[in-house]
Image (cartoon, rainbow, N blue to C red):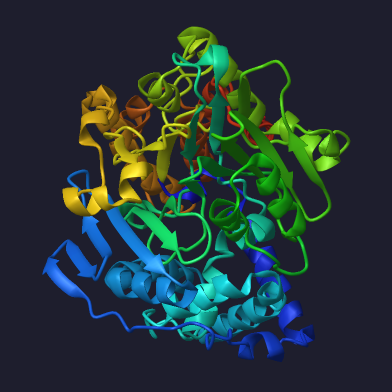
Amino acid sequence: MNKNNRYPYRNDIVKALFYALIVIHLTSCGIQKSIRHIPDVQPYSLEIPQVNKINDSTFSFKQNYLTKNPQQLWELYIKGNPLQLGYNNGALTRDLMRKQEEIFFSKVEGLVPSKFKQNLLRGFLKWYNRKMYLNVREDFQAELYGLSRYASDRYNFIAPEYLRTFYLHGAHDIGHAMQDLMMVGCTSLAVWNENTEDGDLLIGRNFDFYAGDDFAKNKLIEFVEPENGIPYMSVSWPGMIGVVSGMNKEGITVTINAGKSKIPLAAKTPISLVTREILQYAATIDEAVAIAKKRKVFVSESILVGSANDKNAVVIEVSPDHFGVYSVQNSGKVFCTNHFQSEAYKNDKRNRKHKAESHSEYRYEKLQELLQEYKKLNPEKMASVLRNKSGLKGEKIGYGNEKAINQLLAHHAVIFSPRKKLAWVSSDPYQLGEFVCYDLNEIFSDKRLRNGTFSRSDLNIPRDSFAGSQEFKNYEEYRKLSSQIESAANDKEKRIGEEAMAHYQSLNPDFWLVYYQSGKYYFNQKEYSKAKTEFEKALTKEITTVPDKVNVEGYLRKTLKKLK
């Protein structure tokens, strides 16, 4: 789905950001040191990788390896000092990384087509990221430098290779901070003791990050054995050394969920590099908390941390102004959506407003409901929780509704069993495909080399039957048509026939957005009676957020005035 359809205020926000860029560009100073900064890589030995291409989807360099599994997930194994890790990563994933850059930055070129505006954007990025290098570990900078040696020079109009690779690791944070979009409606949970079949800690998460269908195609599972620290796995995309979902060999897990942020004046430590540091250097919850506490972040984020050694899980809640840890007593469950729960944020107005107006609390309540339904979870039941598409009490709220645990846009879903060191990673489509199982004890041992494979296929979780249903086909068609309807709603020259509109609505009949978009189309065509009917239908459905509902009500009022 075109994300603009789901966030009707995006154009106004982009315009406001553009004017802010002009002001910043004209007044910025003190950025020369940051843009000229190159990390010191002299302390690290380096062997330039000579990649052996085994076939179109398998590449190697000594013990470093990249391959694509039958479920179309890329699997990468790298080891070495920080600089060597970056080079090994870049050499093996070069084509994938460049493709990912092309997908991401082609959107930038589309949004900012003129050279003048591109210059403004470049000036803004230099100014906004001027303090980032001061807040990122030197070993991570060396790794990013090695990775950047394999980046394309095609997008040097934005920034040279190293700076661009550096900036990309703050893209999640910058988009979150600058536009406060809350596009990411992630859901995660940890259960243990009486809430799992074997009493062990079990963690599940949906990473509902959407940057386009093409961006999500090349998912990358990284298995990293650093020279210093703890070996770990991470699930993200090519060109990323930060962590959004991961587990280390000690059984520490991290997943991130966006919170409500104010707009900061400078980028500091990207949240994915905070979680990367936790995975590489923490073996207990206390060590994870200590790492998170010493880093200066520039957005609000919840980090769900699970620990095999502690047989416990907590939520570390970070923001530019506050720091809190949410833990439970006498309960074997922790839920995390997109609002804060610790005492540190009890009186935070932004958090309270977000909790009241967004879809975060609704998903939190749905998790409680599902845990009552499933009772004691195992990995298969956890996958069913992550795949759930209904509203509270089983209500049909439309496919793609962000009030659902499964919003049908997830980049990936993961399930972790920290004590057993097992991880399950979803495959396409969304989290409906087969969950592939990985055993970290085997992967970070000689056993992986003997077996020649990464996954434990005997423990995979089967594909969801919904992925082969007619309803799913309808949803996919709805996504394609939705952007066309949105385009027509904003272009008075475009016409949509009655049958075409009825067909569109039949593809996802329980979703409020189809009627809102239909109403906007008829309103702009000055067919106010039809617009009134559609807006009234939208208001009978489960609308995602309070601002969305207010927007629909506003259109209905304007329509009724036109009809007088």
Percent position of residue 259, x then y: 68, 44
The residue at the point 22 percent across, 43 percent down is: 71
Name above or below for residue 178 compared with residue 439: below
The residue at the point 22 percent across, 68 percent down is: 60
Name above or below for residue 170 compared with residue 288: below
Name above or below for residue 468 compared with residue 299: above
Q: In the drawing, does residue 507 fall left or right of residue 187?
A: left
The quarter holding residue 97 reads bottom left
276 or 226: nearer the viewer: 226
Percent position of residue 290, x then y: 73, 50
105 or 54: nearer the viewer: 54
| Residue 496 visible in the displayed image | no
Outermost residue on the right side: it is: 347
The residue at the point 63 percent across, 26 percent down is: 334
Percent position of residue 312, x then y: 61, 29
State how many labels appear.
0
The quarter holding residue 367 reads top right
507 or 94: nearer the viewer: 94
From the image, which quarter does the N terminus lie in? top left
From the image, which quarter does the C terminus lie in? top right
Outermost residue on the left side: it is: 55
Outermost residue on the front side: it is: 446
Q: In the drawing, does residue 495 fall left or right of residue 12?
A: left
513 or 498: nearer the viewer: 513
The residue at the point 46 percent across, 11 percent down is: 374
Percent position of residue 176, x then y: 63, 55
| Residue 331 visible in the displayed image | yes
